[in-house]
Amino acid sequence: MSSADSLRQNKLKKQAAAASVALAVFLTLLKTAGVFYTGSLAVLSSMIDSLADLFASSVTYVAVRVSSQPADKTHRYGHGKAEALSALLQAAFISGSGLFVLYDGICRLITPTSLTQTSFGITIMFISLLLTFGLILFQRHVAAQTNSQAIRADAAHYTVDIVTNASIILTLLIVTFFEIGWFDTFTAVAIALYLIANAYKLANDALALLMDKELSSEIREQLQKLILSCGHVEGVHDLRTRDLGGQYMFELHLELDGNLPLFKAHEYADNVEEKIREVFPGAQIIIHQDPAGLYEQRLDAELDRAENK
């Protein structure tokens, strides 16, 4: 990846993060007014969700700035995992928000509260719906261009908001025209459970990155086929893959003719690196060259033995 491409991607990520923070501030203030006017628990749950988004978006903005920093002497793999840390923090905050709304919902089932000014609440939620949809389109574009986990996580939060905003509009309409007061509490509890489930998935993905989970079997198979298609390559073993936070890293042992001069072996390894980077731009690659047919203790064999125990 060229420095110009890297700068462009970092600029896009910062713009997406800043737009997210600005929208979260506006929606939090708007929905707070809606809570005071309507007394709706569903609107309250959405306001808390926006507050969670404000916190999450602020964390994302900081994480994007940190992860955009180049590698240095103390962080030679770069700072990409700052995004995974932000996603984990977001998951904790979102799950806490969901539990708060769930508790309030149970309290309202015990002690029902009447709603007022539902038309004002519907207007607020409709404005929120349109603005959120616009932000999601921009964030998805940025995530596709940059492979940013933090921006993708933020877009996932706002995708949930689309569902919750639409369900709250429906709820307020039902309460207004059919006077079914308990439906407001039911919607709030459903949103809370959805928030908790979404937080679990977000935390699971972040932990996978932080724990250096192997990339998908599809990527590993694609990588192996690509390496074996290169000239003079007789085999590959001990392939290890991981995500550094929007940037892949591959480590492998390349099997070559043991009689090759060192300069030739180095040239063939460089060819393999070039082929890999054509498919995975910006990847960090470490290649160890082995004479083909050499017996040695291999990681692949150790992992297979561990699995079969």
Image (cartoon, rainbow, N blue to C red):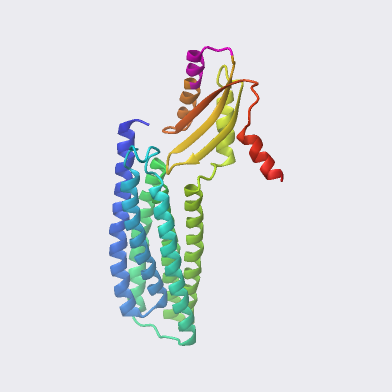
The spot of residue 152 in percent (x, y) is 42, 50
The spot of residue 305 in percent (x, y) is 69, 40
In the displayed structure image, the side of residue 307 where residue 74 appears, left or right: left
- Please identify the quarter of the rendering in which residue 299 is found: top right
The spot of residue 276 in percent (x, y) is 49, 28
Q: Indicate yes or no whether the magenta region holds residue 114.
A: no
In the depicted structure, whether residue 254 falls above or below residue 239: above
- Please identify the quarter of the rendering in which residue 58 is found: bottom left
Instruction: Please tell me whether the stretch drawn in magenta is mainly helix, strand or loop.
Output: helix
- Please identify the quarter of the rendering in which residue 146 is found: top left
Question: How many numbered marks appear?
Answer: 0
Q: Is residue 180 visible?
A: no
Residue at 38% in and 74% down: 44
Q: Is residue 195 visible?
A: yes
- 197 or 31, which lies in front? 197
Residue at 30% in and 37% down: 7
- 257 or 32, which lies in front? 257
Residue at the right extreme, as displayed: 309
In the displayed structure image, the side of residue 103 where residue 254 appears, left or right: right
Give the position of the N terminus as an image quadrant: top left
Residue at 43% in and 39% down: 247
Instruction: Please report the bounds of the magenta region as a residue range.
Output: 259-269
Residue at 34% in and 66% down: 51
In the depicted structure, whether residue 297 falls above or below residue 245: above
Q: Indicate yes or no whether the magenta region holds residue 263.
A: yes
The spot of residue 86 in percent (x, y) is 39, 54
- 61 or 304, which lies in front? 304
In the depicted structure, whether residue 111 falls above or below residue 277: below
